[in-house]
Amino acid sequence: MRARTALVVEDELSTRMLYLSILAAVPNLTVLSASNAAEATMLASLCPFDLAILDLVLPDGSGFDVLEALREHKTPDQVVLVSAYIDEFRQSVRIGPNLILMEKPVAPDRLLSFVNAAPEGDEHDFAFTIVEYLQIACIGLHSVDLEVTRGGAEVGRVAIRDGQLWDAAYQQHAGERAFRHIIALERVAIVCHPPVVSGAPRFIRPDWQPLLIDAARPLAAQAQTARPEIDELIARAAADVRGARFHSAYQAYLRVLERDATNELARRNAERLSTLGFHTPSG
């Protein structure tokens, strides 16, 4: 097994020491630790990490902030997100072979099993959504500004103060209306900043949880309406693959992504077909 480097970020000393003692049993693994987001960000700038175990609620930020700092140098092959509040956002964080959620107290055998199953390849999908950032900031009672970008340009902003959804801006809209537009956006990136303006009045009055649920209802209804068509396209693409009609399969997966940009099956299969050269017209 190749030598690897791990970063443990946990503000509770006893829990941090527990993680270190568990990881001490992993061969060829060098472990560094931090007690807050600032320390972790500094370590991230010094060397790349293969594994990251991140507490989601930190005194000066969140595990999401640390993961963004890590990605600037090398996205870790494996990421463990840990919190006592896992149930609050379990449904929105996109878990996968390289990223898992663990609830405190962490089971040592489960952590070791994940760490020892180091994945092969360089596929990572650790981009977090506005919903995930919102949940962690509000649960942790943080004050942050979430910058929403597309193609490197800012398209919107959400302000959170002391765990309360405070304000939002999108095009000519502000407040709750802007927030609803932002939630519906697809293929955007989120950048978390310290508050730019302090003492600004609050323009979003409802609590973030019911507002988030209410804003998500039209999206869920839209997805439900599109489901039969998406299922038909996926079945058609699978039949095209079996019949060696790879160009047609690629186009079918693209049509799925036009209707559901978060469809992981379509995205991965389209990427594989594109890598094999079937993204160009046949003939």
Image (cartoon, rainbow, N blue to C red):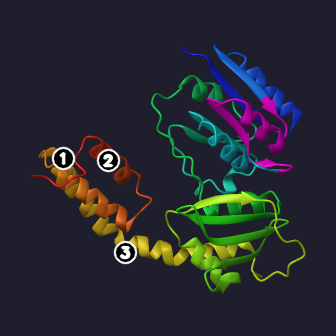
Can you identify the residue that label 3 sits on? 225
Q: Amino acid at mark 3?
A: Thr
- Badge 3 crowding class, 10 Å Cα cut-off, few under 14, some 14 to 19, many 20 or more, is few
* Residue 28 occupies quadrant: top right
Q: Identify the residue shown where x is 58% and y is 57%.
A: 92
Closer to viewer: mark 3 or mark 2 = 2
- Between the residue at mark 1 and the residue at mark 3, the CA separation in whole angstroms equals 26 Å
- Given residues 214 and 73, the one toward you in this image is 73
Q: Nearer the viewer, mark 1 or mark 3?
A: 1
Image coords of residue 95 (percent x, y): 54, 46
Tags 1 and 2 touching, CB below 8 Å: yes
Location of residue 99 (image quadrant): top right
Say few, some or many: other residues with alpha carbon within 10 Å of mark 2 (under 14 / 14 to 19 / 20 or more). Answer: some
Q: CA distance from mark 1 to mark 2?
A: 10 Å
- The residue singled out by tag 2 in the image is 269
Can you identify the residue that label 1 sits on?
241
What is the span of residues highlighted in magenta in the rendered image?
A: 33-60
Q: Label 3, secondary structure: give it.
A: helix
Q: Is residue 73 magenta?
A: no
